[in-house]
Image: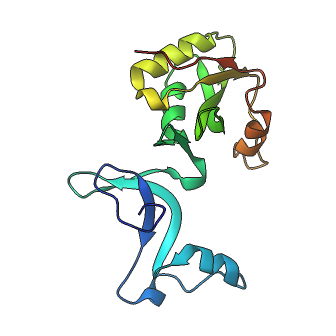
């Protein structure tokens, strides 16, 4: 579904929602949290908070959590897609992609990258790899090489801390004109 709870065509990313003939059979609400229950149960559909799309054969594909989607130049970009491409580079141990404000509206994509011990690669080489593997709108504009990524005690990357850093310490790679 799009942001107006309207179906999107195959290949277009939207929110994954669940509905049933009996609306109460999919979700009866969060325990003692009526406001949160109302937020996710709209128009008799359970809004999962996940983004995905149907392919031409009718299969549903998960893209990312909606809160981890980046809106860039009118396109939805799954942070996980960018991270998968960067993490495929031999020198990279891990990465985290996140939105930063753009002067053009929407967001720009920033990525913080941790290299494997004893390995080296430039931010420019990371962007060059992304330009070969990703559509133009999904290539990160800002790349920060970091010693580590902020994590919770359970190992989940704290992207909100990276967002607070903004573009500080990141190399800037404006989109190439064609």
Residue 32 in the image, given as x and y percentages of width and height: 72, 85
In the picture, the quarter occupied by the C terminus is: top left
In the picture, the quarter occupied by the N terminus is: bottom left
Q: Identify which residue, 163 or 59, lies in the foreground.
A: 163
Q: Residue at x 56, y 27 (%)?
A: 140
Name, please, the residue furthest toward the left. 57
Residue 67 in the image, given as x and y percentages of width and height: 60, 53
Type of colouring: rainbow
User: Relative to 59, does residue 18 appear above or below in the rendering?
Assistant: below
Whether residue 90 is visible to the viewer of this picture, yes or no, is no
Total labels drawn: 0
Q: Residue at x 35, y 87 (%)?
A: 21
User: Relative to 68, does residue 178 appear above or below in the rendering?
Assistant: above
Left/right of residue 169 with respect to residue 45 in the rendered view:
right
Whether residue 19 is visible to the viewer of this picture, yes or no, is yes
Q: Quadrant of residue 92?
A: top right
User: Relative to 12, does residue 45 appear above or below in the rendering?
Assistant: below
Q: Quadrant of residue 113?
A: top right
Residue 64 in the image, given as x and y percentages of width and height: 51, 50
Name, please, the residue furthest toward the front. 104
Q: Residue at x 59, y 48 (%)?
A: 68
Residue 11 in the image, given as x and y percentages of width and height: 31, 49
Left/right of residue 66 with respect to residue 157 in the rendered view:
left
Q: Residue at x 45, y 15 (%)?
A: 177
């Amino acid at each position: 579904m799009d942001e107006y709870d309207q179906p999107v065509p195959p290949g277009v990313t939207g929110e994954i929602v669940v509905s049933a003939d009996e609306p109460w059979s999919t979700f009866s609400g969060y325990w003692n949290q009526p406001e949160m229950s109302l937020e996710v149960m709209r128009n008799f559909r359970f809004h999962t908070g996940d983004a995905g799309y149907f392919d031409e054969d009718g299969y549903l594909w998960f893209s990312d959590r909606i809160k981890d989607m980046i809106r860039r130049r009118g396109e939805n970009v799954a942070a996980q897609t960018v991270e998968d491409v960067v993490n495929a580079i031999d020198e990279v141990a891990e990465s985290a992609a996140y939105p930063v404000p753009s002067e053009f509206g929407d967001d720009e994509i920033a990525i913080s990258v941790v290299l494997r011990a004893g390995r080296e690669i430039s931010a420019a080489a990371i962007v060059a790899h992304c330009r070969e593997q990703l559509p133009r709108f999904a290539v990160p504009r800002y790349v920060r090489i970091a010693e580590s990524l902020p994590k919770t005690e359970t190992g989940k990357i704290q992207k909100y801390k990276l967002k607070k850093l903004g573009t500080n310490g990141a190399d800037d790679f404006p989109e190439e004109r064609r």
